[in-house]
Amino acid sequence: MAKKTTGVLTGWVSYSWSKSERRFDHVNNGEWFPFEYDRRHKLNVTTNYTLPIKERCKFNKSFSINFTLATGNYISIGKQFYHAAPMPESFQTDADNTQYREYIERPNNFRMPAYHHLDISYALDNRKGKGSSWVFGIYNLYARKNPSVIYHKQTREGVTTRSWSLLPFVPSVTWSYHF
């Protein structure tokens, strides 16, 4: 981690490399497999620019930019499919209502795509320490569709792989009062 804490431009850059695996006697024939949250690489860059203070202005003003990049999580996903007898109706859910079943050779056998987003914010902090403060921000400024879930779905054409993402970007307004 490298950090700059003085001046009008402050911030930090941090990078981590990590590996996390699991092993259980009755899972994956007792062999090691990657843990769901094994993120080999993670990079964070944060900058904050404080605008010059004007005498008559009630607020300190600043802009912030944050960037996050991380290796995707591991998930268990079938790479082969087979026809199976339907589950009894008393045990059926929407997910079970299919003619295909997934064959998953080992746990956490697929790494999701890299995850990244850019966030910006503009803050108005009360100079007196008491009173109102505001922060206006946008999470995921360039609307990257980071997949939250990857799954298989049976269609008339066969089984397809799909992904699902949460909101592409999230605007925010925060008001706080300090007394």
Image: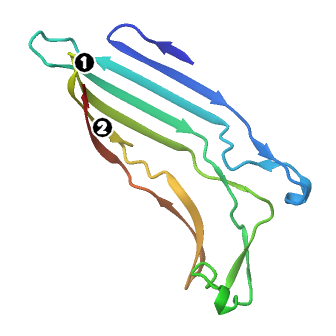
Residue at 14% from the left image edge and 19% from the top image edge: 58
The vertical placement of 127 against 133, above or below, is above
SS assignment at label 2: strand
Q: Quadrant of the N terminus?
A: top right
Residue 4 in the image: above or below residue 122: above
For label 1, the residue is 129
Q: Earlier in the sequence, mark 2 or mark 1?
A: 1
Q: Residue at x 89, y 52 (%)?
A: 31
Q: Is residue 44 above or below residue 80?
A: above
Is residue 110 toward the left or the right of residue 1 in the image?
right
Please report the residue visible at 58 percent of the width from the left and 62 percent of the height from the top.
150
The quarter of the rendered structure image containing the C terminus is top left
For this view, does 2 lie left or right of residue 128? right
Image quarter for residue 160? bottom right
Q: Amino acid at mark 2?
A: Gly
User: Which residue shows up at 31% across the image and 18% down it?
Assistant: 49
> Tag 1: residue type?
Gly
Say if 18 sits above or below 31 in the image: above
Mark 2, other Cα within 10 Å: few <14 / some 14–19 / many ≥20: many
Quadrant of res 77: bottom right
Q: Are marks 2 and 1 in contact (CB under 8 Å)?
A: no
Query: Residue 29's x, y, as percent?
Result: 91, 59
Q: Which mark is residue 137?
A: 2
The mark closer to the camera, 2 or 1, is: 1
Residue furthest to the front:
179
Where residue 122 sits in the image (x, y, percent)? 26, 29
Q: Quadrant of residue 103?
A: bottom right
* Mark 1 element type: loop
> Is 147 or 28 nearer to us in this picture?
28
Q: For the residue carrying disc 1, how many other residues have a C-alpha within 10 Å: few (<14), some (14-19), or many (20+)? A: few
* Residue 105 pos. (x, y %): 80, 64
Q: CA distance from mark 2 to mark 1?
A: 21 Å
